[in-house]
Every structure is written in structure tokens, then in C-alpha cells.
Amino acid sequence: MEKKNVDVLVIGAGPGGYVAAVRAAQLGLRTLLVEKEHVGGVCLNWGCIPSKAMLYGADLKHRMQEHGPKLGIAGPPGEVRVPDLVKWKDGVVSRLVKGIHLLLKTNHVELLTGEATLTGPGSASITGGQGIIEVEASKGIIAATGAEPIAIPGFEPDGRLVIGPREALSPTALPGRLVVIGGGVIGLELGTTYAKLGAKVTVIEMMDQVLPGMDPDLVAVVSRKLRRLDVEVHVSSKAKSHKAGADGVIVEVETPEGLLQVPADQVLVAIGVRSALDRAGLKKLGPTLDQRGNVITDDRMETSIPRVHAVGDLLGPPFLAHKASAQGEAAAEAIADSVPRRTEPIPGAVFTDPQIGTVGLSALEAEKQGRKVITGQYVFSASGRALTSMDADGMVKITADASTHEILGMHLVGPESSELVAVGCLAVSKRLTLEDLGDVIMSHPTLAEGIIEAARSALGRAAHTAKGK
């Protein structure tokens, strides 16, 4: 049995783990990274990146079909060759995976393929093709084992009639009819992709709106676009069972109006994920957990077990790659006795049509905390850039403290909101005021002008927004 001594052991090479390993090595720590499957984790291999690649292809087809004739571009849109689309998506993933391997190599991070099991606060056993290796980590362990899909009894994926997100991102053919169980981020992003590729999509969501927990004003804009895409949405509804039909599957749905039989060629289960606490034996060590079973850490990302740190999805929602990366860096810096970086505010981005971008508090959230706020808003239908792109649905909403004018949050729905929210991240993180933002000059014509206009609107000096809007 081989034995290995390192300063830091990182378990899991997803966006939390590989970033933590790189940062630890940069700080001069002997670092071992263990991954049982592929570096990049779910986000790179079966989530964030492949879904955006597929969505881009679907959006390209849809925009040509919807807007081509208006622009004088004649001819029908091209036929979707699914194998080619999947091949292109896989190529993007492969290129990024190779990039991570290069990062690890150039930063002198040792990578082992295998399954790690914690055996104590500073030790683990790794099982893989190289046999069993006992590891002692003198300075600390970072657990970054991610999350796992939530299953629905009776809707276990079989890879044919019932699939999960991973299978949905590598289709061999497009279903004519797709039922999506779950109207959250994953369900809507994949449902939108399939709808734009030509499938008839039906979304089933238990809560009273899709994208539960998000600002209803933002969700309303997305819901309108779903209707234009001919996506059928049932909220406050529950998928009860399914059975094989003459040409696919019949899903029985309990709706407020009664039972509904929905025919489909495939069912996609996408109700979300939960922290994979059982992986790597972390749960057996007995870390303190919250009421939902997620790991609790301090600002050093250290659990109640000395020298054992946890990052990313193990800490519960929001389940976001960039949250995991920031926490991974903070954990590595704490182990190296460096001042750990801030891990908030954490922005959110939803790649529906239109996109959603959020950071900080909404007006309602701030008021629930007892804060007096002022708000500013700008609609993209007033944006020259949005109109020239035929993508003018949505708005920018800014929330600020009523007395200090400190920007507390920015919430957007509309074109490129996942990119535009970066301005809000900077404003909230650096505690900028409405005046700070309102005095910035943006290029014209750009979508970013709308952010400045929203800040000025809150101050009562918007130059490009009619009063009362």
C-alpha cells in the first residue's frame, strides 16, 4: 500500500476543487487533487458549459426562423443535424477540460484519478487504478464533492423514455414532444433549448411560478416568451405517474384544474440537486449541518472538524459554479494562513430567453430586512441597441438604500443579462452609490446604457425614460 504526504488534499475537481488546488499550489503548498471521473466536474462536462453550447445552437436556429424574414434574409432555416450539434458541444467541453489539465500541470498540482474516502481530519484513502493510496495532509483537506440530482419515485431515468439533464445534453435524436418535470433553472434552460430546436415542450412545476423564489416581475417576462415559443406550462402541478403509450409515454399530471394526461416521446426529470454529503465519507466524520443537511462552515470555509474545509454545493444553495470557485480560493488561502477573500455577493444568471441576471437584494428582500429603499428601473424596449437586435423584452431594476443611496441590488431580465449583471456585481461588492453609477458614461448604442439610466431613474434624473415608466 502506497503512502503519500502532502500539505493539502483536495477532493473533487469541479469548479470548487480544481480552483482550490490551483490556488493552494500558487501559495506554495504541496497539493494533491483527487477526482473520480473528469476534471471540471458536472459544470463543465454535463452542466453549465454543454447546456450553453446546445442553447447557442438552438437560439441560432430559432432567431433565423423568427427574424430572418423580417431582415430580408430569404430561405428556410437549416435542418438541425443533432449529431453535429452534439459533436460541436463535446468539442467545446474537450477543449476546456484540456485547459484545466494544463492549469494543474503548470501550477504543479498533482492529479490522481480515483475515489477518495476521508479516514480522519487529516487523512484519506484513495482507491483507483493505481491501487490503494493512503494520504496524510498536514495542513488541511478541502472537500469539493458537489451535488447529486434529486430523484422522483416512479420517474427513475432509464435513458430512453425518462432521462436526466446529462442525457438531455447528448441526444441521439430530438423528441417531437418533451415533458420537463421541474420549472427551475435547469428545467427551463433545457426546455427552452429543446423548444427552439423544434420540440413541443410541456413544463410541470410544483410551485406557483416557474423559477421559484425569483422576482415575479422578471419571471413574468420569461413566461411571456415561453408562451411565444409554444411551451405549455403548468404551475402548482405535480407529475404523478407515467406509462408507456402507443407512441411514447403518457404522463399523468395533477393540476389545480384536475388530472391531465400529457403525451410525450420523452420525460426529462430536472427538479434540482442536493449536496452530495455522502461522497468521500465526509458525513461519517460528523460535521455540523444545517436543518437541510448542508455543511456549515466559518468564513475560512472550515467545518466543525478541524482542518477539514468544505466548499461549493456541499454548503447548499445556491448551487453555482462561481460560488464554489470563490469558496475554493478562500479555503486554500485560509489553509495557507493568507487572508481569505470575500465570498459574497454571489450573482446569479439564468440562461432562459430572455436571460436573467441578479445580484444583491431586491426591493422586497430589503424591505423585509426593515430597510427603507428607493428603486430605479429601465425597460429594454427603450433601448436602441435592443431594438436593432430584435431583442427588447425585459428591464433593469436597481435597489438602493433610501438615505445613503448605496446600491443594494441589481436585477435584470432581458438581452445579455448574464453579462450585464457584472456591473451590478461591482456596484454591490464595492458599495457604490446611485450617484457613482449614474455619473458613469457608457458607449452608445449599448445595452449597458440601460443600467446607468436605471440608476439615474432612482435619482429622478433619467434622460431617456419617459415619466411614469
Image (cartoon, helix red, strand yellow):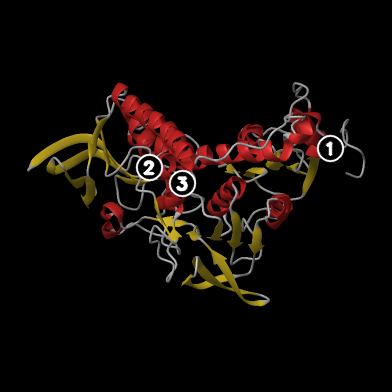
What amino acid is found at the position of numbered circle 2 in the picture?
Answer: Gly
Residue for badge 2: 41
Does residue 340 show up?
no
Residue for badge 3: 169
- 12 on left or right of 262: left
- 233 on left or right of 221: left
Measured Cα–Cα span from mark 1 to mark 3? 42 Å
Above or below, comparing residue 145 to residue 256 in the picture: above
What amino acid is found at the position of numbered circle 3 in the picture?
Answer: Leu
* Neighbour tally class for label 3: few under 14, some 14-19, many 20 plus, Cα within 10 Å: many
Q: Quadrant of residue 233?
A: bottom right
What residue do we see at 79% from left, 44% from top? 375
* Quadrant occupied by the N terminus: top left
N-terminal label among 2 and 3 = 2
Residue 100 position in % (x across, y down) = 36, 30
What residue do we see at 50% from left, 65% from top? 247
* Neighbour tally class for label 1: few under 14, some 14-19, many 20 plus, Cα within 10 Å: many
What amino acid is found at the position of numbered circle 1 in the picture?
Answer: Ser
60 vs 462, nearest the viewer: 60
Does residue 98 show up?
yes
